[in-house]
Every structure is written in C-alpha cells, then in structure tokens.
Image (cartoon, helix red, strand yellow):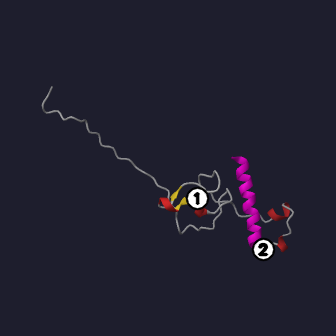
Amino acid sequence: MSKKEKPYIVKKKVVTVIERLYNPKYGDDRICVCGHTYYRHFDGYENNRAVGCKYCQCSDFKEAPPMPKNFLSKKGAIKVLLSKQDQLDIYHRHLEETFNKKN
C-alpha cells in the first residue's frame, strides 16, 4: 500500500443536456398533426419544456399541412355557410381523429 494514493479515483465527464423549450416567436396557433395547437405541447410549470401534447399521445409537435382546398367538399360540408373558424375546427377534428387512429 502506498501512502501517496488517494481514497477515490476521480473521473471527469462532460455531459451535454439538450432541452427543447417553447419558442414564443413560433406562433401559438400553429396546428400539429395531432390536431392541437403548438403551445399545448409545453408545460408552463416546468420552464416551458417540451412535454408532448396535453390532450393526446403526441410526443413531438409536427406542424400539420394547411387544409386542402377540396377538404370540406369531400366531407360533404357546404363551405359557403361555414365561417373560417368553423372550417378550421372541422379540419382540426379530422387531424385528431386521423392521429388517434394511427396511435
């Protein structure tokens, strides 16, 4: 036994932690493929960390494509009688249903 020896072997490690956080400039009203808005994928109580959608099993925000021009006619809806918000609501429900069927 050597008296010069230390009681511990010390190893130094550098650990990189990647945090995915809410970007306020991105746009809260952008819609995910799961049908829910961007900001619903973050936790305000946890420094706005990305935690996945609060309403479904979606773990990552992936922006949905814009509503196709012929989408409502395929659903049998009369576009002229629907407000723009009603049209978007129908599309968002469609996205939710499609996402839920896949998962």
Look at the picture and state if 59 lies above or below 76. Answer: above
Q: Residue at x 26, y 39 (%)?
A: 10
The quarter of the displayed image where residue 13 is located = top left
- Of residue 45 and residue 57, the one placed in the foreground of this image is 45
State the extent of the magenta-drawn residues as a range: 84-103
The quarter of the displayed image where residue 76 is located = bottom right
* Farthest-out residue, left: 3
x then y, percent, for residue 46: 48, 58
Looking at the image, residue 74 sits to the left or right of residue 88; the answer is right
x then y, percent, for residue 30: 63, 65
Look at the picture and state if 98 lies above or below 24. Answer: above
Among numbered discs 1 and 2, the one appearing first in the sequence: 1
Reading the image, the residue beneath label 2 is: 83
Local crowd size for mark 1, using a 10 Å CA cut-off: few (<14), some (14–19), many (≥20): many
CA gap, disc 1 to disc 2?
27 Å
Local crowd size for mark 2, using a 10 Å CA cut-off: few (<14), some (14–19), many (≥20): few
x then y, percent, for residue 26: 56, 67
Reading the image, the residue beneath label 1 is: 41
Looking at the image, residue 31 sits to the left or right of residue 73; the answer is left
Looking at the image, residue 17 sits to the left or right of residue 8; the answer is right
Residue 94 located within the stretch drawn in magenta: yes
